[in-house]
Image: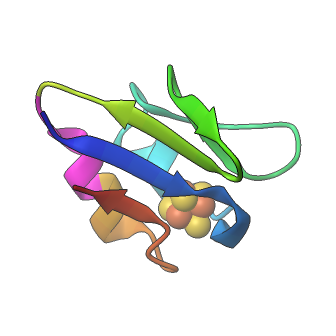
Amino acid sequence: MPKIILEREKCIGCGACEAVCPEYWRMADDGKTNLIGAEKQGENEILEVRKAAGNKDAAEACPVQCILIK
Ligand code: SF4
């Protein structure tokens, strides 16, 4: 199963991930994004999904490449 990883400290809060994949990404009060349902590991947020689906679009849309799919 693919793992979606957000390196949250690198996020610049542009909102692109939420715009292209709102079912997984939501902007938070601190101006950065959250990966909905993810587990926090230090500064990172990690979520295993059955299919990367719209998260691929989010990763491609991110201007600072802080969304990884493994
Ligand atoms: S696209 Fe990248 S920089 Fe923009 S809010 Fe999402 S994770 Fe942050």
Q: Position of residue 60 (x, y in %)?
A: 28, 68
6 up-or-down from 68: above or below: above
Q: Residue at the spot x=65%, y=65% of the render?
A: 11
Check the image and name the residue furthest to the top: 37
**In the rendered view, does 55 fall on the left or right side of 31?**
left
Q: Residue at the spot x=66%, y=72% of the render?
A: 10
**In the rendered view, does 58 fall on the left or right side of 44?**
left
Q: Residue at the spot x=72%, y=65% of the render?
A: 9
32 up-or-down from 59: above or below: above
Q: Position of residue 56 (x, y in %)?
A: 21, 54
Visible residue check, residue 13: yes
- Magenta extent: 51-57
Q: Position of residue 62 (x, y in %)?
A: 44, 69
Q: Residue at the spot x=35%, y=55% of the render?
A: 58
Residue 14 occupies quadrant: bottom right
Q: Quadrant of ligand 1?
A: bottom right
**In the rendered view, does 34 fall on the left or right side of 69?**
right
Q: Quadrant of the C terminus?
A: bottom left
Q: Quadrant of the N terminus?
A: top left
